[in-house]
Amino acid sequence: MASGMQEKQFTPCLLSFFIYNPTFGPREGEEEKKILFYHPNDVEKNEKIRNVGLCEAIVQFTRTFCPTKPAKSLHTQKNRQFFFEPEENFWIVMVVRNPMIEKLNKDGKPPTVEYQEEEILDTVYGAVVRQCYSMYKLFNGTFTRAMEAGGVEMLIQKLEKFFYRYLQTLHLQSCDLLDVFGGISFFPLDKMTYLKIQSFVNRVEESLSLIKYTAFLYNDQLIWSGLEQDDMRILYKYLTTSLFPRHSEPELAGRDSPLRPEVAGNLLHYGRFLTGPTNLKDPEAKFRFPKIFVSTQDGYEELHLIVYKAMSAAACFMISASVELTREFCEKLDGLVGPQLTLLASDICEQFTINRRISGPEKEPQFKFIYFNHMNLAEKSTIHMRKTASVCLTSVHPDLMKILGDINCDFARVDEDEEIIVKAMTDYWVVGKKSDQRELYVILNQKNANLIEVNEAVKKLCATQFNNIFFLD
Amino acid sequence: MSQSSLVAMESVGAQRATATWENGSLAPLDHLRSERADSPTPGLVEGTEPGAGQQSAMFVHSQSFEDLTADAEDKTESKNSEEECEGKLDELVEEEAIEEQCNNMSLESRSREEDVSSEAWRSHKKHVFVLSEAGKPIYTRYGTEEALSSTMGVMMALVSFVEAKKNIIRSIHADGCKVVFLTRSPLVLVGVSRTWQSDKELLRELQYIYYQIVSLLTLTQLNHIFQHKQNYDLRRLLAGSEYLTDNLLHRLDRDPGLLLSAVTCLPLPSSARDVVSSSLQAAKSKNLVFSILLAGDRLVTLVRKKDQFLHHIDLHLVFNLVGSSSSFREGEGWTPICLPKFNTAGFFHAHISYLEPTSELCLILISTDREDFFNMSDCKQRILERLSKRSAYQTMKEALQCPSYSVVQVGIPELRHFLYKSKSSGLYTSPQFPEVYQSDQEQERLMGLYQDLHSFLHHPSRPLRSFYRCGETENLLAQVTSGFELYLCFSPLGTKALADSAVIKLLKWIRKEEDRLFILNPLTY
């Protein structure tokens, strides 16, 4: 290879994202009516129509061979397109450009581009599209609901408003296996503290009978939730990747920092609203909270979402949207929850520190792992650093993460217990175990180990981390 | 043994080291080490693994599997060989030759009447379609081309639509079903699969089908036809040859050789094989390029002109041609065949005959001259005469009685089956299917498992050194080093410890048996 050659690496990125309904513009010349949302918006009209047309053709063509299973993705040299039909005839399409390497040529010739076609995992980005819809639905309800409420115009408006902002928060280059799971990280807790939290939730729900559901989190990890699993899963995603990171703890900020809210006259506790009014004392304060939609037995219900936080403890209270929330209610909640939550937060923190001390000081282990349980959506990862609003940092090479993804695809094919152990070209060992509804992935940095030693190491890990879970040996 | 002497030894090519791998660790060469350091059996440098030939190899196998999918390389290769062959092959493509070819095909009728809108048609495990760039149907595995002309029209429309955006369509994925596209101008090939095979594996299969068609017509001819008349109905030229493609597809589902880019040999004591080889070698002729002796799907020996190599794809196409037709049993066959990996521009002429009417032994003599039939016929007589005087002939006929071996002979408990490929010789060995895999269905399932392992190990961007999977029906271990590829299938009772130790044990056994299982002394004229 020529020494002077310059190379530039590009990560996968969002090329376009659109939503259409083929039944909205069935006649020729009316194709534009099918398109409900299109990003980027400055694409020329005919180009939009052509791209939607291709998707329609792909979906239709695939039906020739599998009438019941719709097309999910299209692979091309330059990009991948993901199709998702969340409601009948409504299609969401996401186009992601393959990562590429640009090689600069001498003599002013245009650079040569080499697309890396095998880097993107369908399962990961398919999950991202589904997540986009779930997030829309959490804050807006279904597409059909918007249609019923205000026709196509209303739907178009809602889509525009939601996705314009949401798409900017997609960080496609750092999506991985965790997006496939869409799990919830639970906070490990002793029984006594857990009971304290439960009784706190009961007390609050008892005194503020408007509250329909409550969820309790500590340190961005879930402890208690009264919601259905699927609703909690997406709410959890919103809280941990969007809301919490935007409100980094003011307790940690300096006294003069603008982050520090007006806490004057309220020195009894550290509680504050993350949604709704920032300062209760402000006479101008508005008592409006974001609305969310959760499923019920016969459809969905609309709720106010109140997120209230004291130090590292956060409580979400959900109240029927038909009720108007007043200053009086918020003051009552603040007065009741604030002091208790502050106390609980320090209790949990203390307990947590004691437990940590017992289990010994943390040292860099020989292995990293991801665990996921399909039954309760519990997930645990020592590969990922703390999530922030923008990126999800991992501590292992992206190729190893993709190998985990490959193994996960293999597991998804058959409903059987299975174990896979592979040795990568970099001599890392990767182990995947599927047992019942649980999946465990371990990356070992023991280059000279053999199959038996790797097996022993994983056994040891299971014994220390998951001593009460049975894994097929 | 010192490092420098090893390097010197390796530089002679794939010649076998005087020290065997058992003697201890021969450090891998620098360039190999950088790719695959710390191989589990450190002594096995490419060219010293069990099964590696003592002379230079018989096949082109530079990248073996990989060159199937790399277009760029493909193009340069064919260009080179085109130039190279210009002198050697005075034969140019003639329509006549094609017709001759087609007439040779027995018109075995296919029962293809099938309702293409039925569930039964849809649920075939693997569909393959070939069409022209004008969207005209050329081949379908199931149903008739006529009934599918609109479907194929849509396929072509999708290909051109994406192409118009300076992009290339690769595949469509639905749950449990995928469609892969391969454009090899002037043809477009489409595969629809309900198997778990990776895109890359399916493309490899389409590539085989493409080469199958080229082997009947030559690429030059194919290009010429479509340049002349874009709308040409190629079925007119291919009529009666569909069974070759049908058969090749069947092989692709079942023959590990096509998966491994390798061929397997008839187990034969090396003394006997050497005698057979030299009999073939002795029957020279000016235009004779390859003499091949087959026993069913197994290679007995192959003798080639110096500096001419046969690519394993070409050899599999020859296997397919011979195995697909019973007409060669009736006498001496003389048929033009293009060996696309050798040269896509011209025809060779193959003399195909069985040594004895009822024998499995089939002799293929490949000549560059279309008027060479009598010369080839004469060569065959010379080979037969020479062979029949030797006891090796009898030994070979006896070997035909048991063309395979049982896995029990290896002596590894719980081992059910395995595939072992020597990379430098391009040959593989594998025992017969055990009791548990007797039905066609079970054998195809096992092949499916091997295909899985293969695609994991040879992932285009994340290749692996080893892969172990423990499931409810079997435990599998696959390993690849610079010298060999190994796929082991254990019963579900096999432990990891067992699997771990099995590799060394099996390599030892193969080393012990390599004289019999592989062709160690390939000859040239």
Image: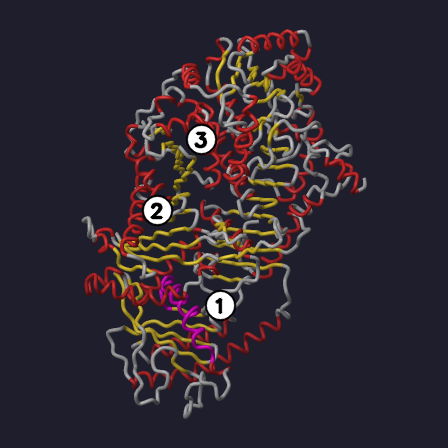
Q: Which mark is residue A387?
A: 1
Considering the whole magenta stretch, tell me its main secondary structure.
Answer: helix
User: Mark 3 falls within which chain?
Assistant: B
Query: Which residue ends up furthest to the front in the rendered image?
Result: A107
- Badge 1 amino acid: Lys
Alpha carbons under labels 1 and 3: distance apart: 49 Å
As for residue A434 lying within the magenta part, the answer is no
The residue lying at 29 percent from left, 60 percent from top is A37
Quadrant location of the C terminus of chain B in the rendered image: top right
In front: A373, or B7? B7
Q: Is residue B104 left or right of residue B61?
A: left
User: Mark 1 falls within which chain?
Assistant: A
* Residue A161 on image: x %, y %: 30, 68
Q: Which mark is residue A71?
A: 2
Quadrant location of the N terminus of chain B in the rendered image: top right
Alpha carbons under labels 3 and 2: distance apart: 26 Å
Pointer 3 residue? B210
